[in-house]
Amino acid sequence: MKQFHIILRLLLFLFGVIGCTGFIVPFLTRRILNIGNLAGLAGCIAIVLYAMFMPGIHQWIRFFWQKRAGRIVLSIFAAGLTAVLVLVVVMTVLMVRAACTRPSENATVIVLGCKAYGERPSIMLEERLKAAIKYLNANSEAACIVSGGQGADETISEAQCMYLYLINNGIDSGRIYREDQSTTTRENITFSYEIIKEQGLNESIAIATNNFHEYRAGKIADDLGLKHGSVSGSTALWLLPTYYARELLAILYEWVF
């Protein structure tokens, strides 16, 4: 049993350290700092501390378990932790399933905006655009809406950046519509739907975004009564932990509010 505890502590410690590294790398390399890597870093630090001080923590738990109030508090904590783990599993399954939902033929592609550096898309935005190009090349009658406004630190709108990328990669400009006012995923889908109605485009849509983001975008499309499928771009492994954690919190926010 003692050897088991030693191995468990070592595994948890290594897991926590690797997790901390995964969440801090985006900040060190690209100054990416959001609620995803902050929450992930906090969780991994907690795991590291638990592994380091496991015997003392277990002794503390045994002490408080002997008291009625302590049992209540510890039971609530355990129930909350279990609920969080179940929610994470459920949301992950929903993300994976949404990313695998195929769109219909010649659907209207909506490319959701992401960070742009002038005329150069960010890594994640480029993955969305690559996925959209693949679908547009395979569906010659499909139109495309590039959706994204201009952030305070962006020199042109995300929509314009995406438009330039698409035409530079062989997509006919006549197939592309620009929506450059949105600042959130909900606005991306809502404002793009207005263009679909104004231009008489196919109301069956193909949402081009990163794989982890498809579920939440699809839920917004459901709210608008749109038939939708996914045109999923991959996510760089070194960015995935940060944005996956952020997306979990964003989905929870959508469910609650």
Image (spheres, rainbow, N blue to C red):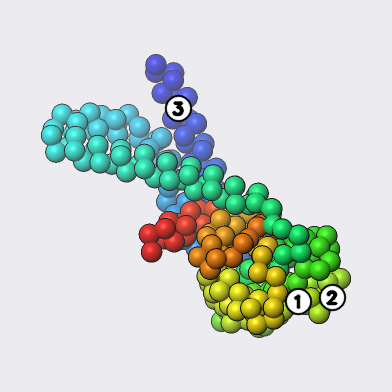
Left or right of 23: which side holds 130?
right
Task: Quote the CA–CA distance across marks 2 and 1.
Answer: 7 Å
For the residues carrying marks 3 and 1, which lies nearer the camera in this image?
1
In x, y percent, where is residue 239? 61, 55
> Dot 2 lies on which element?
loop
Using the image, tell me which numbered label, if any, was put on residue 172: 2
Q: Residues within 10 Å of mark 2 (few under 14, many from 20)?
A: few
Residue 160's place in the image compared with 96, above or below, is below
Residue contact between numbered discs 3 and 1, judged by CB atoms under 8 Å: no
Which mark sits nearer the N-terminus, 2 or 3?
3
Q: Residue at x 57, y 60 (%)?
A: 218
The amino acid type, in three-letter code, at marker 1 is: Ile
Q: Residues within 10 Å of mark 1 (few under 14, many from 20)?
A: many
The N terminus - image quarter:
top left
The quarter of the displayed image where residue 197 is located: bottom right
Residue contact between numbered discs 2 and 1, judged by CB atoms under 8 Å: yes
Residue 187's place in the image compared with 16, above or below, is below
Is 115 in front, or is 202? 202
The amino acid type, in three-letter code, at marker 3 is: Leu
In x, y percent, where is residue 209? 65, 61
Using the image, tell me which numbered label, if any, was put on residue 176: 1
The C terminus - image quarter:
bottom left
**Which residue, as the protein is rendered here, is positioned at the far right?**
170
Q: Residue at x 21, y 41 (%)?
A: 73
Using the image, tell me which numbered label, if any, was put on residue 8: 3
